[in-house]
Amino acid sequence: MFSRLLGAGLVAATLVSGAAAAQLPNARERARAPYDEGLAHMRNEALDKAAKSFDQAIAIDPGFEMAYYMLGRVQLAQRNYASAVYSLQKSRDLFQADATSAATNKQERQSVIRERLADIEQLIIDTRAAAAHPQNSARQGLLLEQVRQYEERRRQLQDLDRNDVMTVSQAVPGFVSLSLGSAYFRAGKLQEAERAYLAAVTADAKIGEAHSNLAVLYMQTGRLDEAEKAVKAAEKAGLRVNPALKDEIKKRKKAGSY
């Protein structure tokens, strides 16, 4: 809709003075209102409304990588795996492009970093609030782990802001690769899922869920030694691995030894 309105108003737009145009909010600023509405809908588990809000944010700012990420999260919860794969791939690709593109000057680069920091800070606040809500008591551990992942990304961005250094492996946040891996896995794309999970633990080695998911994937593809190593990595990261998974890996190893 925004693109159609833009086309229809092109002539009128040329009449706007340079000073007035400079005062107009940019696409990201205008996209933030529906994006924030989407976060509020997610807190209330209103998934359909959240998806519409994130779609609106993307329509305004097609480069809004966090809006694609949150839309992919919603689509995963809705079990719309093909759409989730698309949204999360877009988020990943935008983060990669953002990391490899050269800003025209240091001031512009710092402005972009601080914009990303504001996005992460809002997610930290929202997710902490959700974890503290009584209705989410059963999910508190998962929500607090999400907070930790967001805080790790904040630390990486702060390092980039201070030292202008971020490794290639950190370009895409670990939590984006984790969700993308889950979307791939549920869509039956196991090779792509493995690459995404490996990217997640490379960006953030403490994402125990990604290690555990790798253990499941390795087990299903017959790589039982790797599955055991992934279980140990998950436990080292602080995740309590499902005992049934550990037992099944041992059972399959024992069956294969005869």
Image (cartoon, rainbow, N blue to C red):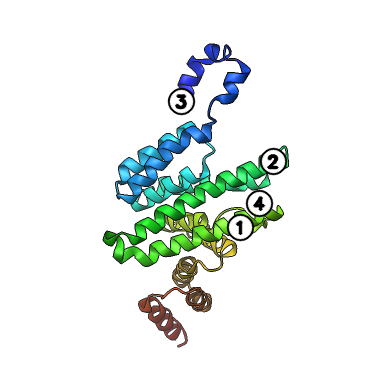
Q: CA distance from mark 3 to mark 2?
A: 29 Å
**Circle 4 residue:** 161
- Local SS, label 1: helix
- Local SS, label 4: helix
Q: Position of residue 16 (x, y in %)?
A: 57, 15
Badge 3 amino acid? Phe
Q: CA distance from mark 3 to mark 1?
A: 34 Å
Mark 2 or 4 closer to N-term? 2
Q: Quadrant of the C terminus?
A: bottom left
**Circle 1 residue:** 156
Badge 1 amino acid? Gln
Residue contact between numbered discs 3 and 1, judged by CB atoms under 8 Å: no
Is residue 4 at all visible to an observer of this figure? yes
Mark 2 or 1 closer to N-term? 2
- Residue 2, labelled with which disc? 3
Q: How dense is the environment of label 2, judged by Cα within 10 Å: few (below 14), some, or many (20 and up)?
A: few
The answer to whether residue 107 is left or right of residue 6 is right
Name the residue located 35 percent from the left edge and 43 percent from the top edge. Answer: 50
Depth check: 18 or 248 in front?
A: 18
Q: CA distance from mark 2 to mark 1?
A: 18 Å
Q: Position of residue 101 (x, y in %)?
A: 68, 42
Mark 3 or 2 closer to N-term? 3
Mark 4 or 3 closer to N-term? 3
- Residue 71, labelled with which disc? none
**Circle 2 residue:** 107
Name the residue located 38 percent from the left edge and 52 percent from the top edge. Answer: 76
Residue contact between numbered discs 3 and 2, judged by CB atoms under 8 Å: no
Q: How dense is the environment of label 3, judged by Cα within 10 Å: few (below 14), some, or many (20 and up)?
A: few
Q: How dense is the environment of label 4, judged by Cα within 10 Å: few (below 14), some, or many (20 and up)?
A: some
Identity of the residue furthest to the bottom in this view: 258
